[in-house]
Image: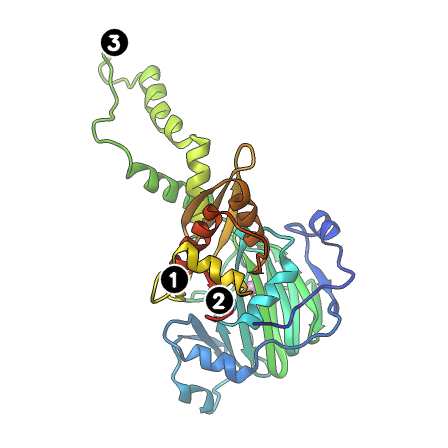
């Protein structure tokens, strides 16, 4: 299977990371050799009607914001509009290869930071209103034109409009604005207020979104995982308890020992690393399931590769690896962990780098076993299955 590719021309990724990433917005005008819009509006509307696809329709009517969650009835798009509206479809890269390919030019940011590609379609005047996100985003204008306005840096105390489902700013004052044409990109770092408004109908925008775990989410999930392995009899002990002047005091020593019980468990770096790889690669859309009807053995995999078939990563699968000592790596895919050495480790790194791979040389049985496990889990497929 061949999907058209996207490449940024004359884009200095190292300079971008140094000067803009997480620091300040950047407008990048027409960086592509040739821009083409990867999804047409009808295809996007079709996705919004599917039950397993996350979508929202936002309408601005009489100074109020209306939010409708998908799946949307097919008739919705034929109805008379009641005000400027926009359709937002989440994780389109997990569903369509042409949109997954749009992530490739942004791979100078590691896989584990990538969230998904959200695609919006708006009629003239449509948009989601002024807001801020907690994540970095590249807003790629796909079709039509959109006015982007940028405002101040926000935080938890920034006043929001009272709305159950939308986090819109109560006040917004633009400090900069641009009209983006097809192929233009606006990079917005976390917490910068922004507002995108369609200028004319048929406005499509691709949000290449990143993720960054919050401290609260990390502590909660890591502690939750940790407790499942802890024994109920692993408890505070005080065989050397000394008599206290005041029985009401919790002694400094007791506090130090209690906190130590938590710290020594939570600070185990290697257990944390293994857990984080699995946590971070847990699938966002597990229903995009490539599990084969019949499981394959290592020899079947060897045969398919010998026949010249390429391996393809399930676009909904998340791949990352951690380097261990010597030449070993821990490969993570869809929440699973695989210990890899020698040529399996080389393969693990290659499949994290490329979304499609054609290993031509002889692979060890360990590597074929690894590929079979990934294939049977639905994280990898062959070009013939797709
Ligand atoms: C949009 O595409 O209209 C919204 C994207 C965003 O502001 O994050
Ligand atoms: Co936004």
Q: Quadrant of residue 103?
A: bottom right
Whether residue 68 can be seen here: yes
The disc, 2 or 1, on the residue closer to the chain's N-terminal end is: 2
Which image quadrant shows ligand 2?
A: bottom right
Q: Position of residue 313 (x, y in %)?
A: 51, 61
Q: Residues within 10 Å of mark 2 (few under 14, many from 20)?
A: some
The quadrant in which the N terminus is found is bottom right
Q: Nearer the viewer, residue 53 or 278?
A: 278
Mark 3 C-beta closer than 8 Å to ligand 2: no
| Res 286 label | 1
Q: Nearer the viewer, residue 159 or 223?
A: 223
Q: Is residue 145 above or below residue 113?
A: below
Left or right of 10, for residue 265: left
Q: Quadrant of residue 165?
A: bottom left
Q: Quadrant of residue 310?
A: bottom right
Using the numbered discs, state the Cα–Cα distance from disc 3 to disc 1 in whole angstroms. 52 Å
Q: Is residue 119 above or below residue 189?
A: below
Q: Nearer the viewer, mark 3 or mark 2?
A: 2
Which type of secondary structure does the marked residue at label 2 adopt?
helix
Q: Position of residue 185 (x, y in %)?
A: 68, 66
The disc, 3 or 2, on the residue closer to the chain's N-terminal end is: 2
The disc, 3 or 1, on the residue closer to the chain's N-terminal end is: 3
Mark 2 C-beta closer than 8 Å to ligand 1: no
Q: Which residue is mark 2?
A: 94
Whether residue 61 can be seen here: no
Q: What residue is rendered at 29% in x and 36% in y?
A: 229
| Res 240 label | 3
Q: Residues within 10 Å of mark 3 (few under 14, many from 20)?
A: few
Which type of secondary structure does the marked residue at label 3 adopt?
loop
């Amino acid at each position: 299977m061949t999907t058209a590719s996207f490449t940024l021309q004359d884009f200095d990724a190292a300079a971008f990371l140094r000067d803009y990433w997480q620091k300040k917005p950047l407008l990048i005008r027409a960086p592509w050799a040739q821009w083409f819009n990867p999804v047409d509006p009808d295809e996007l509307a079709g996705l919004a009607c599917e039950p397993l696809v996350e979508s929202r329709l936002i309408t601005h009517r009489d100074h109020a914001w209306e939010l409708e969650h998908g799946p949307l009835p097919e008739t919705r798009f034929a109805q008379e509009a009641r005000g400027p509206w926009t359709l937002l479809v989440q994780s389109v890269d997990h569903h369509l290869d042409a949109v997954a390919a749009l992530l490739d030019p942004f791979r100078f940011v590691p896989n584990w930071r990538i969230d998904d590609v959200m695609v919006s379609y708006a009629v003239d005047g449509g948009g989601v209103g002024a807001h801020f996100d907690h994540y970095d985003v590249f807003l790629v204008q796909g079709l039509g034109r959109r006015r982007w306005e940028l405002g101040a840096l926000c935080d938890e105390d920034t006043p929001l409009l009272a709305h159950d489902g939308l986090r819109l700013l109560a006040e917004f004052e633009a400090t900069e604005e641009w009209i983006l044409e097809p192929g233009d990109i606006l990079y917005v770092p976390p917490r910068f207020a922004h507002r995108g408004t369609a200028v004319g109908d048929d406005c499509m925008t691709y949000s290449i979104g990143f993720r960054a775990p919050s401290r609260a989410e990390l502590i909660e999930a890591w502690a939750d995982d940790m407790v499942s392995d802890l024994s109920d009899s692993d408890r505070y002990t005080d065989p050397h308890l000394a008599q206290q002047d005041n029985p009401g005091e919790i002694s400094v020593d007791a506090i130090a020992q209690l906190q130590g019980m938590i710290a020594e468990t939570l600070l185990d770096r290697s257990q944390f690393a293994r857990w984080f790889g699995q946590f971070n690669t847990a699938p966002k859309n597990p229903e995009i399931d490539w599990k084969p009807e019949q499981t394959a053995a290592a020899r079947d995999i060897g045969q398919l590769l010998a026949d010249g078939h390429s391996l393809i990563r399930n676009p909904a699968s998340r791949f990352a690896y951690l380097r261990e000592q010597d030449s070993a790596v821990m490969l993570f895919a869809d929440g699973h962990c695989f210990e890899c050495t020698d040529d399996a480790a080389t393969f693990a790194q290659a499949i994290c780098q490329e979304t499609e791979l054609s290993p031509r040389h002889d692979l060890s049985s360990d590597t074929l076993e690894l590929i079979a496990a990934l294939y049977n889990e639905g994280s990898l497929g062959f070009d013939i299955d797709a």
